[in-house]
Image: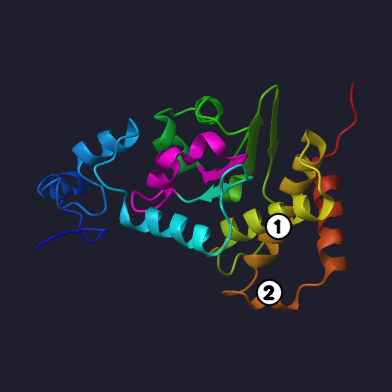
């Protein structure tokens, strides 16, 4: 046997850390063993985690070298998300989008503002934390922004809402060509608006019929919900 991997998630009565610790570090192809995680963290991995290494190889072979590019890492799993960040990518990325559980796991902070600033210290310029039905938090150097989720009476299927949010956000930024604080705030609201449509039906059902006038209308409704006059 040359390589061993532990298929997760495991049954509740089996701690994942106990299971992966039983695997020989020399055959731990997912780099889950604490010894391999430590080597990866200090930049001298015994071997690269299989899935993240495959992702990087696919990018390189397809002519998309991530070096010097604006890279967004989505996900927190020990299989892909975390190792990708640790493979010297975090210092090169422009923006990181994670959910609140991911933010706390990566930063080891319970407070989300502190968690975001801890992630910023790793290299990214922008950190956006998705909070599901509670909205989204953005933190960058010298600025903090929070937008609530659009209130809906009926939620059919929340699956994919986070990905829709990220896609809408990135789509807006790509369309405008600007990544300053003002456009980032608008992008978050557009992403939230799109996510609110996604949950109105199963799978991609609602998005398949969605029209730009509907998106812009909801953006305006979103703005009116959060607008108030100064004292």
Residue 107 in view in this figure: yes
Q: Which of 205/47 is in front?
A: 47
Total numbered labels placed on residues in the image:
2
Q: Which of 144/177 is in front?
A: 177
The quadrant where residue 193 appears: bottom right
Above or below, 102 against 154 in this view is: above
Crowding at dot 1, Cα within 10 Å, few <14 / some 14-19 / many 20+, comes out as many
Say which residue label 1 marks. 168
* Image x and y of residue 135, in percent: 63, 45
Magenta highlight on residue 119 = no
* Image x and y of residue 43, in percent: 35, 34
Magenta highlight on residue 84 = yes
What secondary structure is marked by label 2? helix
User: Which tag is nearer the camera, tag 1 or tag 2?
Assistant: 1
Residue 130 in view in this figure: no
Give me the C-alpha separation between circle 1 and circle 2.
Answer: 14 Å
Q: Which residue is drawn at 77% across and 34% down?
A: 181
Q: Give the range drawn in magenta.
A: 76-99
Q: Which of 221/88 is in front?
A: 88
Above or below, 202 against 223 in this view is: below
Residue 206: give its label. 2
Check the picture and name the quadrant holding the C terminus: top right
Above or below, 196 against 229 in this view is: below
């Amino acid at each position: 046997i040359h390589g061993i991997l532990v298929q997760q998630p495991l049954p509740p009565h089996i701690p994942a850390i106990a299971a992966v610790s039983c695997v020989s570090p020399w055959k731990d192809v997912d780099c889950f063993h604490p010894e391999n995680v430590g080597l990866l963290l200090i930049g001298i991995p015994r071997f690269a985690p299989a899935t993240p290494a495959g992702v990087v190889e696919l990018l390189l072979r397809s002519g998309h070298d991530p070096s010097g590019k604006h890279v967004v890492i989505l996900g927190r799993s020990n299989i892909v998300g975390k190792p990708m960040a640790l493979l010297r990518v975090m210092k090169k990325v422009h923006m990181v989008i994670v959910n609140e559980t991911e933010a706390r796991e990566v930063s080891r902070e319970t407070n989300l503002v502190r968690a975001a600033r801890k992630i910023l210290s790793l290299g990214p310029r922008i950190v956006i934390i998705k909070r599901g039905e509670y909205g989204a938090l953005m933190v960058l150097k010298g600025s903090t922004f929070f937008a609530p989720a659009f209130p809906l009476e009926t939620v059919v299927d929340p699956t994919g809402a986070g990905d829709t949010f990220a896609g809408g956000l990135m789509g807006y930024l790509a369309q405008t060509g600007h990544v300053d604080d003002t456009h980032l705030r608008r992008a978050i609201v557009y992403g939230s608006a799109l996510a609110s449509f996604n949950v109105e039906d199963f799978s991609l059902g609602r998005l398949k019929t969605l029209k730009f006038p509907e998106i812009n209308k909801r953006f305006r409704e979103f703005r009116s919900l959060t607008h108030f006059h100064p004292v």
